[in-house]
Amino acid sequence: MSYLAVFLILLPISCAASTLVEKKFNECLMTKLDGNSESIEKIIFTTSSSLYTPVLESLEQNPRWLNSSRKPLIILTPFHEIEIQAGIRCSRQLGLQIRIRSGGHDYEGLSYLSKDPFVMVDLINMRSIQVNLADETAWVQASASLGELYYKISKASKVHGFPAGTCPSVGIGGHISGGGQGVKLRKHGLAADHVVDAYIIDANGNIHDRKSMGEDVFWAIRGGSATSYGVILAWKIRLCSMLKEHWRNEPTMLFTGGNTQHMNSMRIFSSERVVAQNSGDKSKTFKATFNSLFLGGIERLIPLMNESFQELGLQGKDCTEMSWIQSVLFFGGFNKDDPLELLLNRTTSYKSSFKAKSDFVKEPIPKTGLEGAWKIVSEEDTLAMLLMDPYGGRMNETSESETPFPHRKGNLYNIQYLVKWEVNSKEASKKHEEWAKMIYKYMTPYVSKSPRASYFNYKDLDLGQNKHHNTSYSKASVWGNKYFKGNFRRLAQNYQNEI
């Protein structure tokens, strides 16, 4: 099997030359498809097309990239796998890179941008979902959104679900290929932990399933960036039971402060996303919200809470019971009784430019450390926040080498530092990106070390920007070690063995 990321000599091309390349790509595609395709005009969009910009921006979730000049030369929106195969072969023939878009949420715009001429393969038309309750699995095409998957499962079963992310518009292809953390990871682990098969197209345009791609590649694509190995067509996933379940009796401290009691909430909850944010203006106000999910009824929750957090005085009226699919709505930013059809919306309701970074925390952060972080958040003059997702439970029971995603036992939680802004300009971007760098630097003493780990789906190109890392390989090894720790060596070896 050959990987998609082939090494080519790529040079900048002029406007006239780009028009010629577009023409040659079109001709090549028509030849290879030989009439076995949708109308060519429906699947190819060049920079001269009136639909190019609407198609490019349709799924782009971060307007920060809209003003870039490093956009795709051609956008291909295939309806069938044969069109992807032809697109790959024509791209290789013409010396063009390929970038894949499934949901449009790439944090650093890597699906949208490149210094070199490239073709974006936008999989928007390939998002079918087939649920098989007989063996409790589903085949999900790469561009199906998490919301579409949750909706489809809920219509097929009242007792099944899938443990993946909270944002309904995220594409399943990219989400799983980076690991896929979500609300149920303490009980069920990552989305990638539940993949049992996949279809992928390699650099030669050949289609493989798990058997023909081999276990090394199958291991690599479940959290190690599938686009390095090919174009994911579909994942076969194992569904999970979402009936009332037993919580995992595993005390873990989120943070400590003075004489306050250690917060053992992870012992009780399947999920407890802590959102600490400012008001989004210059008022310098700050608030923290604990969104907690308990797998069980109120009658079991209240005694447990009163045992650990007696000072809260929690009562039944403070809690809301809901089904799994209602919890999906809730964590997705909707009301639990809203129509499920809201999950089918492919775009986020609120788009703004943003920059993010991430860390993993292994030891409780002292009160003084948190107070300093809160101060930095509250003083930013636009919306800034820390999102903290607890680990433990099932994550502690899975080996670091089970999949490329290594952040398992010993992590208390993952932190995402996120800043958003409305004015899409270079000046605004630079200013707020500096804020992200500032809080990331401040948090250095309180987070994981050797390496300072990060979550691959929260991509951050700053990780490789260091004056000591002046080659492509040294930069790759820096971010590779942060994202994949000891698994990076195996990923690199698998890649080299296949080239």
Image (tube, rainbow, N blue to C red):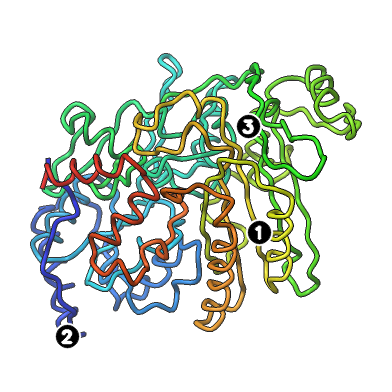
Residue at position x 88%, y 26% in the image = 316
> Within 10 angstroms of label 3, few (less than 14), some, or many (20 or more) residues?
many
Distance from disc 1 to disc 2, alpha carbons, whole Å, reads 46 Å
- Image check: 354 left or right of 488? right
**Could you tell me which secondary element the residue under label 1 belongs to?**
strand
> Within 10 angstroms of label 2, few (less than 14), some, or many (20 or more) residues?
few
Which numbered tag is attached to residue 319?
none
Residue occupied by mark 2: 16
> Which numbered disc, 1 or 3, marks the residue closer to the eye?
1
- Image check: 273 left or right of 262? left
Distance from disc 1 to disc 3, alpha carbons, whole Å, reads 26 Å
State which tag comes first along the sequence, 1 or 2.
Answer: 2
Which one is in front, 192 or 57? 192
- Image check: 146 left or right of 498? right
- Residue 303 occupies which quadrant of the picture? top right
| Vertical placement of residue 480 versus 243, above or below | below
Amino acid type, mark 2: Ala
**Could you tell me which secondary element the residue under label 2 belongs to?**
helix
Q: Are marks 1 and 2 in contact (CB under 8 Å)?
A: no
Residue occupied by mark 1: 385
Name the spot of residue 388 as percent of width and height, x first.
62, 46
Q: Quadrant of the N terminus?
A: top left
Name the spot of residue 208 as percent of width and height, x first.
19, 35
Which one is in front, 334 or 7? 7
Residue occupied by mark 3: 325
- Residue 434 occupies which quadrant of the picture? bottom right
Residue at position x 43%, y 44% in the image = 175
Q: Are marks 1 and 3 in contact (CB under 8 Å)?
A: no
